[in-house]
Image (spheres, rainbow, N blue to C red):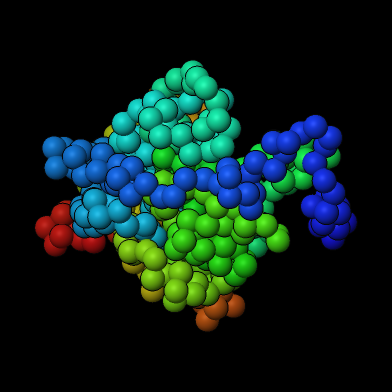
Amino acid sequence: MTIWLCRLLLALLPGPLGDSKANTFINNSDFSFRPIDFMRLKMLNEQLEKLFLKDKSPFIDILGQEEAKQGIKSALMQNRHIIIVGAPGIGKTTMAKNIARLLPDLEAIEGCSYNCAKKNPVCPSCRQAKSHKPVRISGSKRFVRIQGSPDLTVEDLLGDIDPIKALKFGPLSLEAFTPGKIFKANNGILFFDELNRCPEKLQNSLLQVLEERKATIGSYDVDFDVDFICICTMNPEDTSTEKLSDVLLDRFDVIYMTYPETMDIEKKIVLMKGRKLADVSEDMLALMTYFVRLLRQDEKLEKKPSVRASIGLYERAQSNALLEGRKSVEFNDIKKVLVSVLSHRIRLKPSVRYLESVENYIQEQFRKNVENAKWQSHLEEQESSDYR
Ligand SMILES: [Zn+2]
């Protein structure tokens, strides 16, 4: 409240004496940003289009998920913003980072907070400067992440006026404005994780930016011209969230990501992402992923274990083997870490939860489906029945 009052007073004050260029940023038609250059706006998606047509499998960090990959390629080629929907630990962030890495290097202007391209500077400071020092910025450096949460403010997204700088440079000066994440994502990827966890007010600001490329901060209108691809994520199992408005959803195409389609893919992901300290035989690896996939199919669970659970079993079983003075993982190494790795990654449905603890449930399922059963024969069955 005090900050807003301070801003209001600052806004009413004239800029510092002799600083005729103080009001260079906001609500000043002389220095407002250029109108949107549609030729330039095409560039991000054009760059990707060229790449997708040349390279059929550009998303090398994600195994499987062919349908999602196809959907993402087709949406991005048409300059669409996307929402990736899927449970936690499914690879949504990895996918978005992979897209950013595909973007070619940008010849930007050194020191600019808006990632101005040298060929087409958009911020007033770069546009007024007589000469620019170029700097190359890779695609992965133009990946800006926002974590959706109820505490996230519009200022985090759009930017804010710094009261101390405002006193020095003038309340409406560019120097007094600290750009938010949206500006930093210019010419890159704005990755909005768990969009549906942020407050409605913030969703409205995002909508305005996507719709009009015009943002409002407090009582100011800030016109800006940014080009970014917005990739959001949503977890369909998260019930403690805000409902996304239909108008906001209308700005996006939705891509669904699933758990690894086959056990073979899941094993490959575990080997790719997991840390290797000891030997893990093919059988032991199969056992771990088999049990996690079995829990994922379990109708008594309302929260399912992700690939992180398989990776967790893989890594922790190796630690146990080493601590026992062995170089390779044995059955008991896995058994001992089950509860520690899995109990918080799954949740029983209320009807089951009241009768049994999650710890007991895991141990019982393991005993029944793995220990007492000949789990090798389960594996063979799965392979022949295209287990999903
Ligand atoms: Zn700039």
- Quadrant housing residue 152: bottom right
Position of residue 299 in the picture relative to residue 127 (left or right): left
User: Residue 359: horizontal and vertical position, in percent?
Assistant: 55, 60
Q: Residue at 37%, 46% (x, y): give it.
A: 37
User: Residue 216: horizontal and vertical position, in percent?
Assistant: 62, 59
Position of residue 325 in the picture relative to residue 250 (left or right): right
Query: Of all residues shown, which one is farthest toward the bottom?
Result: 351
Q: Is residue 50 above or below residue 304?
A: above
Position of residue 226 in the picture relative to residue 215 (left or right): left
Q: Residue at 30%, 53% (x, y): give it.
A: 79
The N terminus: image quadrant: bottom right
Q: Is residue 129 above or below residue 251?
A: above
Residue 37 vs residue 235, the one in the foreground: 37
Position of residue 276 in the picture relative to residue 181 (left or right): left
Q: Residue at 39%, 60% (x, y): give it.
A: 83
User: Residue 384: horizontal and vertical position, in percent?
Assistant: 11, 58
Q: Residue at 49%, 53% (x, y): give it.
A: 192
- Quadrant housing residue 375: bottom left
Residue 102 vs residue 214, the one in the foreground: 214
Residue 366 vs residue 145, the one in the foreground: 145
Query: From where the camera sits, is residue 30 visible?
Result: yes
Q: Is residue 235 above or below residue 350?
A: above
